[in-house]
Image (cartoon, helix red, strand yellow):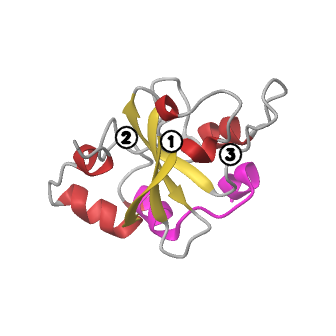
Amino acid sequence: SETIREIGFEPSTLYVQLLQEVGNGGFGPGYGLLGLVGGATDDMGKTAVGLYKNFAQSDPNDPTWNWPHGLLPVCHWGCAIYSCIDCTSEEAMVMTWDPNQWEDGTSPTLAIRSTEMSLAEWLQDWTDGVNLWEKMFPSS
């Protein structure tokens, strides 16, 4: 598919099915799920594919920048925070990218945390009305 050609890996099957059967993004938690090629975008006009390609580029000014292969940003929460799917894990684990926890000159992985939920569990929580933001950022 065009998506696989663009990003170099196969997105989560569940995510692809959801976008094919419900709509190519624009619904869901946060500001909505990002679509694949030709789908819904974030506030900067990027689909999940466009955002991944952006993140996956090396930065000549920051040699430590190395976005994890297969980590697809799929949901924008504002403040440049995204929920991402680890497409290299069988369960399609949902991770949180929070650049506010990241410093120039460090690996982006330092600002990526696991939600400890698979995509299926994450979507189930969303449909059950669970506050996913509070699960991502529990007030300590």
Compute the Cα span from label 2 to label 3. 24 Å
Depth check: 17 or 86 in front? 86
The amino acid type of the residue labelled 3 equals Trp
Residue 20 % position (x, y): 45, 59
Q: Is residue 33 magenta?
A: no
Tell me whether the residue at label 2 lies in contact with that at label 3, contact meaning CB atoms closer than 8 angstroms: no
Name the amino acid type tagged 2: Gly
Q: Is residue 101 left or right of residue 118?
A: right
Q: Quadrant of the C terminus?
A: top left
Q: Which residue is mark 1?
A: 39
Q: Looking at the picture, how far across and down is residue 102, in whole percent?
A: 56, 33
**Which residue does the image show at 54% across and 38% down from the upper left?**
47
Give SS at disc 3.
Answer: loop
Residue density around tag 2, few if under 14, some if 14–19, many if 20 or more, within 10 Å? some
Q: Which residue type does callout 1 highlight?
A: Gly
The residue identified by callout 3 is: 67
Q: Is residue 10 magenta?
A: yes
Mark 1 touches mark 2? (CB < 8 Å): yes
Q: Nearer the viewer, mark 3 or mark 1?
A: 3
Q: Which residues are magenta?
A: 1-20
- Tag on residue 91? none
Q: Is residue 104 left or right of residue 27?
A: right
Q: Residue at x 30, y 47 (%)?
A: 28
